[in-house]
Image: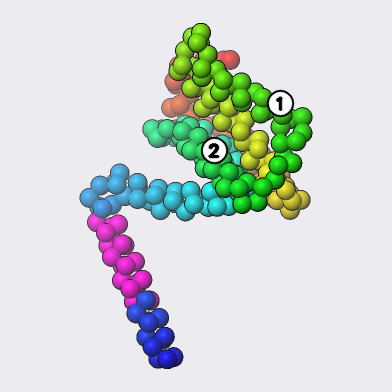
Amino acid sequence: MKEKISRAILINKSLVISAMLLFSVAFAVLAAYSLTTGLLLIVAIIALPCIYASIVYPKFGIIMLILLESFIFWFIRMGSSFPLGTLIDVFQGLLLLGFLIKQKQYPNWKIYNNPVSIIVTIWIAYNFLQLINPVASSMLAWLYTIRSVALSMLMYYVFVYNLNSKEYIRLIIKIWLGISVFVALYAINQEFYGFFPFEEVGLQSEKVKSLLFI
């Protein structure tokens, strides 16, 4: 019996190693054939575990959202053409999905029973009622409001549900302070050593100039 188990384990290991080798070769060929394809594969390798973890472990997703929202404009200034703003919307959607799953498994209705929750709920309900407003001037404007404001407001429930321990709150504060220190050091670097080349290019944009003027 032990020999059969050992043999099965060896076979499984061999299959896993063979699959990994085949994947490595395929990945190398695709990357050599097309740089874009290779980059997309790298993104997929990173994104898929993050998507799964954000749904199953919303506390991990909250940390990822904080990091993403803190550094997104940095990557945009580097010249990324990918719609990174949409990526934040996707993360928020994943967190909402994880919240609904957790709420079904481990219900916590107390988070709705406070003045802030009631006001947020009324405000979100009002926004959705505007969908059937017969005198609404623009459906597209409604969609932008739901996407940019209402979705962010729904994060209130996600945070209230998951910020349920002192240890996790301390971790969030430490991450927030760490980001703040990094941003401060980055600002000092800009003040005394100047901008990076990609920042200089970005500052030439008329849109950026207008925003800085504001």
Q: Amino acid at mark 1?
A: Ile
**In the rendering, at what x and y percent does residue 189 appear?**
59, 36
**198 and 132: which one is in front?**
132
Q: Is residue 8 above or below residue 108?
A: below
Q: Secondary structure at mark 2?
A: helix
Label 1, residues with CA under 10 Å away: few <14, some 14-19, many ≥20: few
Which quadrant would residue 212 be assigned to in this image?
A: top right
**In the rendering, at what x and y percent does residue 152 appear?**
59, 31
Which quadrant would residue 92 be assigned to in this image?
A: top right
Residue range (magenta):
13-29
Label 2, residues with CA under 10 Å away: few <14, some 14-19, many ≥20: many
Does residue 14 show up magenta in the picture? yes
Using the image, tell me which numbered label, if any, was put on residue 92. 2
CA gap between label 1 and label 2 equals 20 Å
> Marks 1 and 2: which is nearer the front?
1
Write down the residue under mark 1: 119
Residue at screen point 45% across, 26% down: 202
Does residue 22 show up magenta in the picture? yes
**15 and 143: which one is in front?**
143
